[in-house]
Amino acid sequence: MAANTVPIFTKTPNVGVVNIFTAELDLDNPTASAVVFTAAADGSVLKRIRVKGIGASTTAGLIHIWLVRSSVYYLYKQIVVTAATPSATVASFEATETLNLYLASGDTVEVACSKNEDFDVTAEGEDY
């Protein structure tokens, strides 16, 4: 019986950053999404995604996360955005989602918002 007897460790950090601001209404074939993470030649693991509202305010909405494989979009997760109006005593919207998503070579992860609001999205992962 063949078995992998050698542990596999990641080699390189892979951090992607993108700004999103255009509403995406099509969850099957998005056109306003942006690539935030690309898997390496030997595959990658996407550990977490962090979303930070950077506009004057946010209203209730969603951040959509797709896994894209061979040009096919798979809606993987949605993060709920809560209303916030930043001030000297109120922080802007922020959310961190732990994924631990293993990706094959060539896979990408794309993100978009459900409303015309401004967000920075950071994807933290590692390459094999």
Image (spheres, helix red, strand yellow):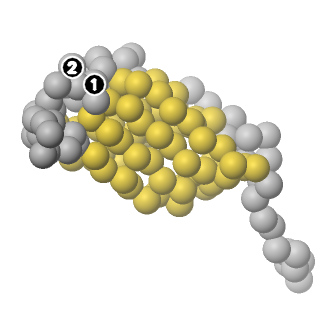
Residue lying at the far bottom of the rendered structure: 1
Q: Quadrant of residue 115?
A: top left
Q: Which residue is mark 2?
A: 116
In-image side of 18 versus 56 (left or right): right
Residue 35 is marked as none
x, y percentage for residue 8?
80, 67
Q: Looking at the image, is 104 positioned above or below residue 63? A: below
Secondary structure type for disc 1: loop
x, y percentage for residue 6?
88, 75
Mark count: 2
- Residue that appears at 61% across and 31% down: 70
- Residue that appears at 23% across and 25% down: 55
Within 10 Å of disc 2 (Cα), the crowding (few <14, some 14-19, many 20+) is some
- Residue that appears at 79% across and 40% down: 41
x, y percentage for residue 27?
31, 30
Q: Which residue is mark 1?
A: 118
State which mark lies toward you, 2 or 1. Answer: 1
In-image side of 124 versus 122 (left or right): right
Q: Amino acid at mark 2?
A: Asn
In-image side of 125 versus 21 (left or right): right
Q: Looking at the image, is 29 positioned above or below residue 51? A: above
Res 29 seen here: no
Q: Looking at the image, is 74 positioned above or below residue 5? A: above
Q: Quadrant of residue 33?
A: top left
Res 11 seen here: yes
Q: Looking at the image, is 71 positioned above or below residue 66? A: above
